[in-house]
Amino acid sequence: MNTIYNILILFTTLFCSHPFDDGYDIGDIATDFSLENIDGSFVSLSDFKDAKGFIIVFTCNTCPYAVLYEDRIEALNKKYAHQGYPVIAIMPNNVETKPGDSMISMRERAIDKGFTFPYLIDAGQKIYPQYGATKTPHVFILESTPRGPLVRYIGGIDDNYKDASLVKTPYVEEVIESLKNGYEIKQTKTKAIGCSIKL
Amino acid sequence: MKIHFVLIAFCFLACKSEVKTKDNNAVSLPILEIHDFSGIEPYLNLDGSKTYIVNFWATWCAPCVKEIPYFEAIQANYPKHVEVILISLDFPRQYESKLKPFIQKHQLKSKVIVLDDPDMNSWIPKVNADWDGAIPVTLIYNNSKRTFYNRTFTYDELETELETFLTIK
């Protein structure tokens, strides 16, 4: 049995381009990070002393799905940052593979779109594998607890990438509302198409 | 009367140029088969004698585009035993501007089907429970075996995988 398990692990390691079995699951404690923001400062979760939680969004400039969600990500920050649940956007791609995701491009996009959330670059590509992000956009909702930031939700933003007005279930909003009100989270994981993170 | 003549002449000219454009499109651009997931699902469960290679891709996805020639080559090299089905996740607004020109430019011989279904959480798990939504992904199946690949392929890698399906039959 052990051998089969080892072979499986070896197989996964050898043949999976995405480490999709790794990373956080619901109930894990997320480690903090210190990543460069588009204004040159470095941002950590611990900087947000009063945060009740975080909406971590792995996103980028170049993925069409991420672009379709830009306004909705900004709307989430506008709605929830002052309620204690700020959006932290992290760009996970290798900028040599995707020059359109360079720090300069990120800054220009943020200015054009009027982003009010931190837009950080995972320059060493060390943070996204810890979370287990595999694509953009990919959301992780954390709740601040005495033990640390607890992973409460992993998945998509809502159920209609094409048209925000046709959304039936705004996954992220439902999770934050549940956290705010102490309700059970109905959907802790959802699936959404995205662009694979570029190595 | 004069106005009539001008109008008729105008119509004639307008119609003529329109017909010409349409003809051009008909000759050059492929017709797309577009489905929501219920229309795609049968292609994930075909009951024929072939081994089916189903690839989820999009023209905007660089790693997907890179491996399309390998799927095409497999289709060409195993015409009797393999059917490649390329399921495009391109956006509707890019069907004309990106997808059709891509199919035309690369002279794709494999079957291309378009999946247009925004409620992704409802159908992604039906393709495979382990798929979290990043593309490209590929499903290879036949009557006796079914494997989902959350990875990219080179031609040799694809052929090696395919052989495991062909030998067990």
Image (cartoon, rainbow, N blue to C red):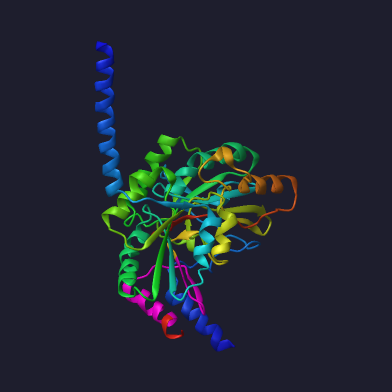
Q: Is residue B108 magenta?
A: no
Residue range (magenta): B138-165
Residue most toward the front? B1
Q: Quadrant of residue B151?
A: bottom left
Residue A26: image x %, image y %? 64, 61
Q: Residue at x 48, y 75 (%)?
A: B142
Q: Residue at x 52, y 56 (%)?
A: B39
Given residues A8 and A168, the one toward you in this image is A168
Which of these two is toward me, B31 or A140?
Answer: B31
Decide which of A139, A110 is in the foreground and name it. Answer: A139
Residue B149 screen position, x and y as percent: 46, 70
Number of marks in the rendered image: 0
Q: Is residue B156 magenta?
A: yes
Relative image position of residue B120 (x, y in whole percent): 55, 53
Q: At 38% from the left edge and 55% from the top edge, which residue is drawn?
A: B61
Image quadrant where residue B80 sits: bottom left
